[in-house]
Amino acid sequence: MTTLTVNGKRHEVDADIRTSLLDALREHLALTGTKKGCDHGQCGACTVLVNGRRINSCLTLAVMHENDEITTIEGLGQPENLHPMQESFLHEDGYQCGYCTPGQIVSAVGMLGEFKDGWASHASGDLEGKLDLSDAEISERMSGNICRCSAYPNIVNAIRKASETKETA
Amino acid sequence: MNTHVMDKPVGRTRLDDRTQDIIGKPLDRYEGALKVTGTAPYSHEHLQGEDVAYGFLVLSSIGKGKVTSIDTSAAMEIEGVLSVVEGDNIPRASAEPMSDGHKMANGGVFHYGQPIAFVVAKTFEIARQAAHLVKAAYEEEEGRFKLSDEKGRARISDGGVMESDTKRGDFEKAFEKAEVQYDETFTTPSQSASAMEPHATVAKWDGDQLTIWSSGQLVSSNTTQIATGVGIEESQIHFICPYIGGGFGSKLGIGPEAVLAALAAKKVGKPVKVALTRQQVYQATSRRSEAIQRIRIGCTKEGRITAIAHENWLANSEGNDFFEPAGVSTVFLYAGEDRLVTHRVAQTDVLMTSAVRAPGEAVGLLALENAMDELAEKLGLDPIEFRKINEPDKNPQDDTPFSSRKLLECYEEGAKRFGWTDRPEKPGARREGDWLIGYGMAAGSRKNMIVPSSADVELTADGRLTIRSSMTDIGTGTYTILSQIAAEVLGLPIDRVDVELGDSRLPSGSGSGGSFGANSAGSSVYVACEDLIAQLAKRLDVDPESLTLKDGFAIAGNRQVPIGEIAGGQTLLASGSIKPGETAENTHQASYGAHFCEVGVNAVTGEARVRRLLTVAAAGRIFNEKTAKSQCYGGQIWGIGGALMEDLVVDARSGMIVNHNLAEYHVPVNADIQNLEVVLLDEHDPYGSPLAGKGIGELALAGVGAAVTNAIYNACGARVRDYPMTLDKIIAGMTV
Ligand code: FES
Ligand code: FES
């Protein structure tokens, strides 16, 4: 048995030692909001937050996360109680088929945290100085989340708008 | 059932009156809250908490030959393995779109990575492990893996979405006589739809009744395909797919896993879940054909086209007749008396080819629109001017009138907004540091059609309406636009309209494909609403025309009644169907657009970056400005991908698709994209459908890639006729 803490709730999971965190969420805990697009770290559809940082849940095993706080899309908000980032994706039409969307949204929340903590990116002018959340910064930092519907312009708009509301940051 | 056959142009309708003023509005998506919270269920996500088994496909490791034996003993020894399905009746790949069923392997191997067995186990992990222990022995044969080698054996096919040949006059003679001649051959690569949701199925039996949750764009024919494969009646199948994680043509025919899941579920006595791995999606579903395209254009010194030809060589696997209709736009886009468009299909032993977003236009317009750019330069004409000279006033192939065509307006509006007059005069003329700057443009067109579609609407006493159809929403916005059409016609506040889709028990919808979904399914909803209005009017004893419907009230003369109360507490039901008719024959229908692109090409590395891209399009009535524009951004980005990176590489020794994953099959990512703009011109096409709309989802892709590569030429002088235009080819072709 593995104990996982997901969205503030503890779960006992009877999973194979080989079960990825992604499959534990989807097949054992019925948390299917986290999507499987490639199962090997190439698409970002499976993005979750582990202790506040974004990771690809397909690239890590469930048994490695006994003492971690895991946040999935379901933990950010629900249809009647949307997180500001979800709200922003909804209004800006930052999705089409919706399959990459939970990963995009969780990734965006994690990305803003990295940004706030001063992590530079390839698009940053300066590795040490003050960062500016330009469209180029957002695009660069979100390039680990593929959207084949290609909602990128609206994804960038959604993240920019959400970053301007207090609750998200 | 109220059926509308599109024999005549539609007159003024309630969509023009806009009493409720909701049609076209940029509303948020109907199902949006479910999608952004991860609560919209996709195919693999059904039967949560039930006792299910997991399936895993075993694929062939040769490209051509026979399976002589399959040894499952090592797999069966693993604890938790329930069964291995093998034998003859295993689908070779996805079913061909609209076909009755899959081509079956029957022991043969028709392409590398063809399904040969299906392992079912208690858990996903066990199924995956066991699948790797299944050992097949083969009798290998020499395969044909390269289109260029097979070109000489290519044949006419009658299984395409257009005639393989269209001819007018005597092209060869006219071309020979032309004052100016252009003759070049282009090659475009195979591509993969690469939808983010892998093909996935959950299959469950109750007695002899089968419930299938699977990703299919066309519910009706997908149900038929499963019935054929499993060997049961369609009436025994309940097919459900409320949400599809992208299709782009790859889910028009049902994937190979659906039949196997159903057969396996029967065998093991419990539901079976299966999703293809990402590599299996590339190797075992379908792909866009590579193409060899020869373009010849003859014209006068002044630039009037007299002769135009587009000859195409495409690939498909044995028994599959589809061909990528790469010449589809050349049939009608430009004037010219003598014309020739041909398609020849060569058999190869590579995964079958099928429709991928904008089949035909996506790759055909790369060649045609590059040719137009090259020829304009040769003639000393501005590319827009050259196109204007050759704008036909009727279909140049058969003289039918265009139902609507605003291509000239698209050029003009686009040139103005983009600042076309500021175009660098010649390659190398504008440089910013290491970056060479260029502008390019291209025209785009997409054939328009509707297909039969049906829907029901139900009005309850509380004044709520429910729309029901087996139509699908693959991210195109169907839920939302159907609710907008009904709300406008019936004068209902939008939050009183519900939509149920993607279920084979509902009236048969058109499904999603070929940009026909919105108009076909939308028209059936429109027709059903008209029928409902007739019922309401009859009960109120007035003419339907004199009935005003607004904000949930029916207003006739000095009476105003809540619409739900008219039937005295009863529920009212109405059905509608649409069928294509004479307008499809006596008018030529297409959507049109013009694309304008600015690129920067790095003079040192050859890297090309799209700096801005503008599409001006006219596609009939727009039902929701927001979702329509999102479709267009998507199309533009696919166009950029097709120009610069997408290339499905087949190993010429084995037929294996080498770059079968999202890291090596390059699709555009967020950082590849900046400054996209889409402008939709006001247009109504009364011949297209009762909604006066035309297709849009694929138009915005048609021609984009050529605008990008024409801009690359303008920047640095590189003409590359072998797509995609990667930096190695750009560097080699640079003239500045
Ligand atoms: S599913 Fe994890 S990155 Fe694609
Ligand atoms: S919304 Fe379809 S893949 Fe992103």
Image: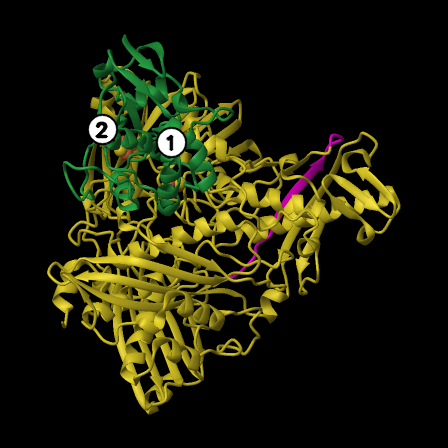
Chain colours: A green, B yellow
Who's the residue at 17% across and 37% down the image? A129
Who's the residue at 60% across and 52% down the image? B452
Which residues make up the magenta segment? B448-462
In-image side of B619 versus B522 (left or right): left
Vertical position of residue B540 compared to residue B578: above or below: above
Q: Percent position (x, y) of residue B149?
A: 20, 64
Circle 1 sits in a helix, a strand or a loop, which is it?
Answer: helix
In-image side of B30 versus B107 (left or right): right
Q: Percent position (x, y) of residue B281?
A: 31, 41
Of B348 and A166, nearer the camera is: A166
Vertical position of residue B237 compared to residue B1: above or below: above
For label 2, the residue is: A117
Of B95 and B247, nearer the camera is: B247
Chain ID of residue with mark 1? A
Q: Amino acid at mark 1?
A: Pro
Vertical position of residue B524 compared to residue B242: above or below: below
For label 1, the residue is: A102
**Is residue B241 located in the magenta-colored stretch of the structure?**
no
Q: Amino acid at mark 2?
A: Asp
Chain ID of residue with mark 2? A
Q: Can see residue B89?
A: no
Q: Percent position (x, y) of residue B267?
A: 40, 23
Which corner quadrant of the image does residue B30 belong to?
top right
